[in-house]
Amino acid sequence: MAVGIIGGCQEYTGAPYFAAITALKVGADLSHVFCTKDAATVIKSYSPELIVHPVLDSPNAVDEVDKWLPRLHSIVVGPGLGRDDKLLKNAKDIIEKSKTRDIPIIIDADGLWLVAQQPSIIQGYQKGILTPNFMEFSRLYEAVHHEPLDSRDNQRTAVQLSAAMGNLTVVLKGEEDVITDGNKVIVCSQEGSGRRCGGQGDLLSGSLGVLAHWAFSSPVENTKSSITPPLVAAYGACTLTRQCNRQAFHKHGRATTTSDMIQEIGGAFKTLFES
């Protein structure tokens, strides 16, 4: 099973690395990062485990990624993407190509900035999953509904956004993670810690890349009909991220970073899903 991460530019090299290495540690066989030329050497230097393609800012970026799409089982768009117009345009075209292959598409970070500009890119695609934090969520909500967000009821507004996006699965990250497909709402309040470090969301989107593929591939009789595969996958990714956070904090306290959380993935996965 192989995951593709679409993101990584000169300023942001950590996020795509975190998402890609998480996918491997959760159980992907291969993790590909499609980034800009000047980010590639940096990301390669973090780990020999990743396959890094320095193509995202090349003139034929979309064709370069398209060559690999038949080998990818899901893609995560946005970690470290940045907001350069050319990169956003390439990301948009890669999303379009991926939709024709019917694979899960997880959109996070600056990928969500792109969706807020053009919601139709992913609207109605049933294997699309959005993972906004509160800021990204309000931007998306206001782009789709053309009215300010009422922040008193996250569950209701998350359901509204999901429905407006054609019942896409939305994971609103926060003190509690609100997961919805516009019909059902699942709240993840698995204990984490008070320490929220930058990069934690990349761990969530990277793990979701793997879990979404597994959930969609599993026989239908294994899943309760009212809970769809993307809801199952999203709940798994949220609990896993929180468990990693909790275990890392237990060891490192306020010094906890996302790298410490990544060291906990194996143990956290075992505790949650294999015990």
Image: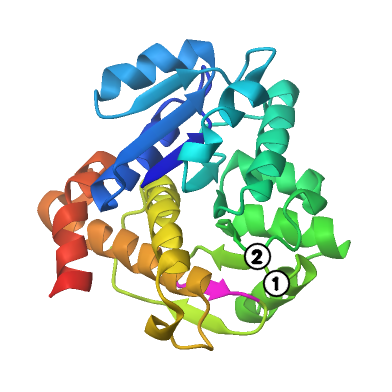
Q: Amino acid at mark 1?
A: Asn
Q: In the orientation shown, which residue stands out farthest toward the right? A: 146
Q: Residue 116: horizontal and vertical position, in percent?
A: 76, 49
Q: How is the image coloured?
A: rainbow
Q: Quadrant of residue 236?
A: bottom left
Q: Quadrant of residue 163?
A: bottom right
Q: Nearer the viewer, mark 2 or mark 1?
A: 2
User: Can you see residue 198?
Assistant: no
Q: Residue 273: horizontal and vertical position, in percent?
A: 22, 71
The one nearer the camera, 170 or 172, is 170
Alpha carbons under labels 2 and 1: distance apart: 7 Å
Q: Residue 199: horizontal and vertical position, in percent?
A: 39, 42
Query: Mark 2 touching mark 1, by CB under 8 A?
Result: yes
Q: Amino acid at mark 2?
A: Gln
Q: Which residue corresponds to the image point at 54% horizontal and 36% vertical from the top-left?
A: 69
User: Can you see residue 206?
Assistant: yes
Question: Circle 2 sits on which residue?
Answer: 126
Which label number is shown at residue 148?
none
Q: Residue 89: horizontal and vertical position, in percent?
A: 74, 29
Instruction: Tell me: residue 192, above or below residue 154.
Output: above
The segment highlighted magenta reads 175-181
Queried whether the magenta region covers residue 179, the answer comes back as: yes
Question: Circle 1 sits on which residue?
Answer: 167
Secondary structure type for disc 2: loop
Q: Which residue corresponds to the image point at 33% horizontal and 19% vertical from the top-left?
A: 44
